[in-house]
Image (tube, rainbow, N blue to C red):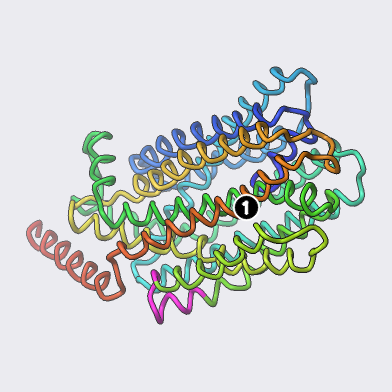
């Protein structure tokens, strides 16, 4: 909801200038990045009868829900009062968000060590993740069609989604703890499962890991393209294509619906041709869609929806492939260093992604404002603003995708190499156990 609606909400509904809205998004990503790093490393060091991850997930659920609702209020009319209100709430929300989602994303390596099972596991994970996005977009479309007042419709949307979001968080804990906690307790018996080194040293070791560098680059480029395209969708649909506010959830549904339909396909292909090759195939189709969005003209509505669907084919690889690669990186690093650092790697990946997105989204807000964009008047925009919307929708995401495709060639962990890594890890653990015995 934040990706597709919040920038538009801040400018068109709350009445913030695009410059201030872009500054909020910039500060949000910086704050999100910092809190990601803090939560990830602290969760690695958490010790409780419920393990390292679950206390964070359970305690963060209620603040997560409440803060999300508060993001959709318009409590003031003054620009700077609104600015500080939204900045405060988004910081609180993102800390709660990280407390829930970062330990959650670090669970897969503790659920299975299999190279292909991790891809399958992430296929299930992102099927439900994208399914939730689709459900929220359907709800958004229905609410926006039925309630004419934008402030009321967005507030209702935030309330419904915030309340519903708590349920799967708690279901996740109930459904996984019997598998995760025994594995975590077994790992805790190994000398190299608990990292007591200084924080700076942990981060330095992770950043020097070459497979990790490749995965971060791929992920950063992929999600820059996703975020730019998503954030610009309402501007593109309403301002460039001349459609109504109720139409841009349909464009978002075209992306997400196709993405969820293609997850199983990419999961299968990653097993047969490899994760890197599957990524290249999907992103190539996505690149065609981005160029098409740059060139599509008002009136070509069916073509626009077709291009968004084609983009969704590639977007599903952005969800699936980098997150399927990262658990393998954790194993490779454990073999090299003797330490298991899921939280550090996952938090660093998101930290670096958010820092990059912070700059990209801040620049996006500045470009929109400098282009002469007129707030609250979707039918009357200068040619410079329309050109900026098209470039931000089509060209810049395409450039990010091309960079990401070049980075895939440097990712070294194939299925065969990962099997060798696991064999050496098991031998190392067996040797350590024998020495203790």
Residue 255, by quadrant, is bottom right
Task: Rate crowding at label 1 as few (under 14), some (14 to 19) or many (20 or more) other CA atoms within 10 Å.
Answer: many
Q: In the orientation shown, which residue stands out farthest toward the left?
A: 435
**Could you tell me residue 119's position as x and y percent?**
44, 69
- Quarter that holds the C terminus: bottom left
Q: Which residue is mark 1?
A: 229
Q: Residue furthest front?
A: 383
Residue 395 lies, with reference to residue 26, above or below; the image says below
Whether the magenta-drawn stretch holds residue 370 is answered as no
Prevalent SS, magenta region: helix
Horizontal and vertical percent position of residue 166: 65, 47
Residue drawn at (84%, 53%) of the image: 243
Q: Magenta segment range?
A: 266-276
Q: Secondary structure at mark 1?
A: helix
Task: Say how many tags the image has.
Answer: 1
Q: Nearer the viewer, residue 60 or 355?
A: 355
**Residue positioned 58% across, 73% down in the render:** 262
- Image coordinates of residue 382 in percent, x first then y, are 77, 39
Which residue is found at the position 80% from the left and 49% from the top?
A: 238
Q: Quadrant of residue 17?
A: top right
């Amino acid at each position: 909801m934040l990706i597709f609606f919040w920038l538009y909400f801040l400018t068109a509904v709350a009445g913030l200038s695009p410059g201030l809205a872009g500054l909020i998004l910039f500060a949000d990503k910086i704050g999100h990045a910092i809190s990601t790093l803090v939560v990830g490393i602290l969760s690695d060091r958490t010790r409780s009868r419920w393990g390292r991850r679950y206390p964070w997930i359970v305690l963060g659920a209620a603040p997560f829900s409440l803060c999300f609702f508060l993001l959709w209020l318009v409590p003031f009319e003054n620009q700077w009062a609104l600015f500080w209100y939204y900045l405060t709430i988004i910081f609180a929300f993102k800390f709660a968000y990280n407390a829930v989602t970062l330990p959650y994303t670090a669970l897969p390596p503790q659920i299975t060590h299999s190279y292909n099972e991790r891809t399958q596991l992430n296929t299930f994970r992102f099927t439900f993740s994208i399914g939730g996005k689709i459900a929220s977009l359907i709800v958004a479309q229905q609410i926006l069609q039925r309630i004419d007042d934008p402030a009321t419709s967005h507030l209702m949307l935030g309330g419904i989604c915030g309340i519903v979001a708590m349920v799967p968080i708690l279901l996740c804990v109930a459904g996984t703890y019997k598998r995760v906690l025994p594995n975590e307790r077994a790992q805790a018996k190994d000398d190299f499962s608990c990292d007591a080194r200084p924080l700076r040293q942990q981060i330095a070791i992770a950043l020097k890991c070459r497979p990790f560098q490749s995965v971060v680059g791929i992920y950063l480029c992929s999600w820059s393209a996703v975020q730019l395209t998503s954030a610009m969708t309402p501007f593109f649909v309403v301002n460039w294509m001349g459609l109504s506010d109720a139409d841009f959830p349909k464009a978002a549904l075209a992306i997400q619906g196709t993405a969820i339909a293609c997850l199983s396909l990419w999961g299968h292909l990653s097993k047969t041709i490899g994760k890197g090759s599957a990524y290249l195939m999907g992103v190539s189709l996505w690149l065609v869609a981005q160029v098409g969005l740059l060139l599509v003209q008002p009136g070509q509505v069916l073509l626009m929806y077709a291009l968004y669907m084609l983009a969704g084919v590639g977007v599903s690889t952005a969800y699936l492939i980098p997150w399927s690669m990262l658990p393998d990186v954790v194993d490779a690093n454990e073999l090299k260093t003797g330490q298991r650092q899921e939280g550090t790697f996952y938090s660093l990946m998101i930290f670096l992604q958010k820092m990059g997105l912070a700059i990209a989204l801040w620049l996006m807000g500045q470009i929109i404002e400098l282009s002469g964009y007129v707030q609250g008047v979707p039918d009357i925009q200068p040619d410079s603003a329309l050109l900026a919307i098209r470039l931000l929708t089509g060209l810049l995401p395409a450039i990010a995708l091309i960079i990401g495709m070049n980075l895939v060639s440097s990712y070294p962990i194939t299925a065969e190499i990962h099997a060798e890594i696991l064999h050496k890890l098991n031998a190392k653990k067996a040797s350590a156990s024998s020495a203790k015995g």
